[in-house]
Amino acid sequence: MEIDELTGIVIDECIAIHRELGPGLFENVYEAVLAGRLEARGLKVARQLAVPVEFDGQLFGSAFRLDILVEDQLILEIKAVERLSQTHIRQLLTYLRLLKQPVGLLLNFNHATMKDGIRRVANEYNSR
């Protein structure tokens, strides 16, 4: 599946979930509901996936945990905060770089409308 089609499906599901549940819940609730909705659509979903880090010849197997990986190619980072910060963006960029993925979505369910809480982040890091 093309990444743009995949992001479209995720965004549609996020908007539907936000309309139903609204803002104000914990991140893990939105994560669980979104993962369930994506799985119900037949997509492969991994939650709380360990992101390994290799440094100085050593592998640190679970240095980080990303929220959701869809179809082994789209990283979703779920937030329920007043405002997204540069730290949140850098967190997602780190996951993208470490997993060598091109794009991820930063999804903040704490906005009045979900449309305002969606940020697409592209990995411009070239490991070659």
Image: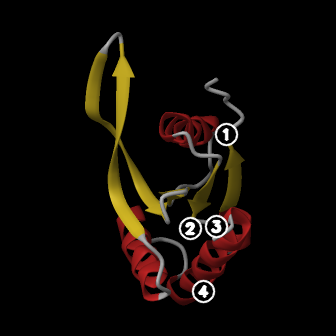
Q: Residue at x 73, y 66 (%)?
A: 4
Measured Cα–Cα span from mark 1 to mark 3: 25 Å
* Residue on which disc 1 sits: 123
Occupied quadrant, residue 89 = top right
Instruction: Give the mark, 1 or 4, whose residue is nearer the N terminus.
Output: 4
State which mark lies toward you, 2 or 4.
Answer: 4
Circle on res. 16: 4
Occupied quadrant, residue 20 = bottom right
State which mark lies toward you, 1 or 2.
Answer: 1
* Residue on which disc 2 sits: 109
Q: Do the residues labelled 2 and 3 touch (CB within 8 Å)?
A: yes
Amino acid type, label 1: Asn
Q: Which residue is drawn at 50% across and 84% down?
A: 21
Rate crowding at label 1 as few (under 14), some (14 to 19) or many (20 or more) other CA atoms within 10 Å: some
State which mark lies toward you, 1 or 4.
Answer: 1
Instruction: Give the mark, 1 or 2, whose residue is nearer the N terminus.
Output: 2
| Residue 34 placement (x, y as % from top left) | 46, 76
Instruction: Give the mark, 3 or 4, whose residue is nearer the N terminus.
Output: 4
Instruction: Give the mark, 2 or 4, whose residue is nearer the N terminus.
Output: 4
Element under label 1?
A: loop
Circle on res. 111: 3
Question: Residue at the top extreme?
Answer: 56
Visible residue check, residue 57? yes
Rate crowding at label 2 as few (under 14), some (14 to 19) or many (20 or more) other CA atoms within 10 Å: many
Instruction: Give the mark, 1 or 3, whose residue is nearer the N terminus.
Output: 3
Element under label 4?
A: helix
| Residue 49 placement (x, y as % from top left) | 34, 52
Element under label 2?
A: loop
7 left or right, relative to 56: right
Amino acid type, label 4: Ala
